Image (cartoon, rainbow, N blue to C red):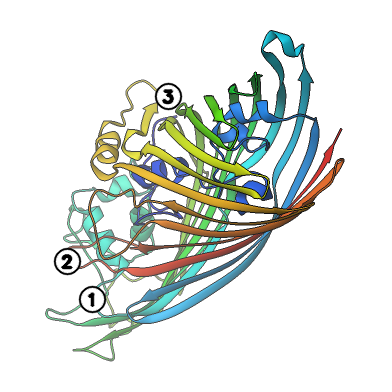
């Protein structure tokens, strides 16, 4: 199928606007967060130099070489979301609880003759949820500056009416599969004069009119990126550890969003009330699969010190999108001869796509380079990681000949920058008990600075017990970030919702060694 520019999408990160923004999606699928076992997440996800956990398969497979026994683990989790949005001074909150299974692993350890210097290693098959895409939010307020219909008028300028129609027994117009065309078919705008490519709205009847409208947006999203890793880590003389891994990633993202305008009021003509309300309804089903590989090393020069480095290749995704849309409008005075003939002849009007739009493409997310250091004693450890990633290196490629993502790729390069992310954590040990704490910082990836700090901060804590044949670890993570949401673009100031997303996640890892 040809590349289709969809008209809206819910994106959990970054600035959001009307229009599926491939630029924002590139960041969404590249900016994966801390993942792995409750032990590692309890120390902020810092593990490049640490090893001895199945999470090493994600960041530095050399850490698998530190195993001295085989193990099986399962990690269920529960997330509590509290999201707030402020739109034209009105604050709205949305809460959601999500149960998930973010971790599963099997590690098989083997040993060799210690006289050879190669002491053996571990083969691991692991599953980790590397990106949580479940998120709901809503906002509503009165807007006296503009309407989504103003966006439709701008977008329709230059389009022929015929291109936005789907006549009976004829192929649809070239621009029918857009929200703007659905708005035209809902009588929200008309061509003036008839048949021209210039349009006006019945909601702007007078010059110098100040129009106030109640606006509400509701967004619901489900999905995740999950990585299965097949990895091996080797141990050389308990000094040098080397590892490699293959990652197989599945992606599923299903946002649905509603935008409603109602209670139209006009400063110069309070009695003019042609429209009760209209609502847009858009749904997406975005699925994909990807592959990457990783290489890493850990060096232990002295017993209490370990240093590590790893390389995670770009992830190569193949993605398919299904998009459906509908607009409903409810009219007053539809049968009143004093109102314009451009009004519908019935109170309820709707238009929708007869079938989903399908778009297929490929995206390559940027590589990651990690370094880490760990100080270890019989009482525990302190460890820190530094991650280097350039989000501006994400790239799209078309599937069909003739399609091009040149504009989107140039925009990605111009909008995102190279960043350094930090992780730090510590564990205290006493007998079979463990206490942990950590911090994870993902830097603001945007080149242009605004009043919004778009970094992601995660505070973590954890506890655990460990015996010879069994261990249990509990971790708690509090993550927060800010963003802005603009439901559409117009000439002049765009409407903006200022949003804060907070998520508390509890994880329990149960492990059995053998």
**For the residue labelled by badge 1, is the local secondary structure a helix, a strand or a loop?**
loop
| 33 or 111: nearer the viewer | 111
CB contact under 8 Å: marks 1 and 2: yes
**For the residue labelled by badge 3, is the local secondary structure a helix, a strand or a loop?**
loop
Horizontal side, residue 367 vs residue 339: left or right:
right
Give me the residue at 59% from left, 26% from top: 62
Residue picked out by circle 1: 145
Of label 3 and label 2, which has the lower sequence position?
3
Split into 4 quadrants, where in the image is the C terminus?
Answer: top right
- Identify the residue at the far top of this view: 116
Of label 1 and label 2, which has the lower sequence position?
1
Would you say residue 341 is visible in this rendering?
yes
| 265 or 88: nearer the viewer | 88
Is 135 placed above or below 147 here?
A: above
Give me the residue at 72% from left, 10% from top: 115
Residue 494 in the image: state x and y as whole percent: 25, 66
Residue picked out by circle 2: 492
Residue 353 in the image: state x and y as whole percent: 48, 49
Marks counted in the figure total 3
Split into 4 quadrants, where in the image is the N terminus?
Answer: top left
């Amino acid at each position: 199928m040809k590349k289709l520019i969809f008209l809206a999408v819910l994106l959990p990160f970054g600035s959001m606007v009307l229009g599926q923004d491939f630029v924002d999606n590139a960041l969404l699928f590249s900016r994966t967060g801390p993942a792995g076992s409750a032990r590692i997440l309890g120390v902020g996800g810092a593990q490049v130099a640490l090893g001895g956990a199945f999470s090493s398969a994600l960041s530095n497979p050399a850490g698998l070489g530190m195993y001295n026994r085989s193990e099986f683990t399962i990690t269920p989790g529960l997330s509590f979301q509290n999201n707030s949005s402020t739109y034209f001074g009105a604050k709205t909150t949305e809460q959601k609880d999500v149960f998930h299974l973010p971790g599963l692993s099997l590690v098989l350890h083997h040993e060799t003759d210690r006289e050879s210097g190669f002491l053996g290693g571990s083969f691991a098959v692991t599953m980790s949820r590397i990106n949580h895409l479940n998120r709901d939010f809503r906002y509503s307020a009165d807007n006296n500056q503009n309407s989504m219909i103003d966006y439709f008028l701008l977008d329709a300028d230059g389009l022929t009416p015929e291109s936005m129609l789907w006549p009976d027994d004829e192929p649809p117009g070239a621009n029918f599969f857009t929200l703007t065309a659905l708005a035209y078919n809902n009588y929200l705008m008309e061509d003036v004069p008839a048949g021209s490519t210039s349009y006006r709205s019945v909601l702007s009847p007078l010059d110098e009119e100040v129009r106030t409208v109640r606006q509400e947006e509701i967004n619901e999203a489900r999905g995740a990126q999950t990585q299965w890793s097949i990895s091996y880590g080797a141990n050389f003389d308990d000094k040098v550890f080397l590892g490699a891994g293959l990652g197989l990633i599945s992606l599923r993202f299903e946002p649905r969003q509603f935008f409603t305008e109602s209670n139209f009021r006009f400063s110069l003509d309070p009695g003019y009330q042609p429209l009760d309300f209209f609502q847009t309804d858009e749904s997406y089903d975005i699925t994909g699969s990807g592959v990457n590989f990783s290489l890493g090393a850990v060096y232990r020069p002295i017993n209490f010190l370990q240093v590590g480095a790893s390389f995670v290749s770009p992830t190569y995704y193949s993605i398919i999108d299904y998009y459906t849309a509908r607009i409903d409008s409810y009219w007053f005075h539809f049968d009143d001869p004093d109102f314009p003939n451009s009004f519908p002849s019935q109170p309820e009007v709707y238009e929708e796509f007869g079938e989903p739009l399908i778009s297929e493409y490929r995206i390559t997310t940027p590589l990651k380079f990690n370094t880490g250091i760990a100080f270890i004693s019989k009482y525990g450890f302190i460890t820190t990681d530094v991650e280097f990633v350039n989000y501006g290196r994400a790239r799209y490629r078309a599937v069909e000949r003739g399609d091009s993502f040149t504009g989107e790729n140039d925009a990605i390069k111009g909008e995102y920058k190279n960043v350094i992310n930090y992780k730090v954590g510590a564990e205290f040990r006493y007998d079979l008990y463990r206490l942990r704490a950590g911090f994870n910082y993902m830097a603001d990836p945007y080149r242009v600075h605004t009043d919004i700090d778009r970094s992601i901060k995660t505070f973590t804590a954890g506890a655990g017990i460990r015996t010879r044949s069994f261990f249990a670890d509990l971790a708690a993570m509090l993550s927060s970030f800010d963003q802005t949401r603009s439901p559409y673009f117009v000439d002049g100031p765009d409407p903006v919702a200022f949003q804060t997303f907070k998520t508390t996640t509890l994880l329990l890892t149960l492990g059995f060694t053998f």
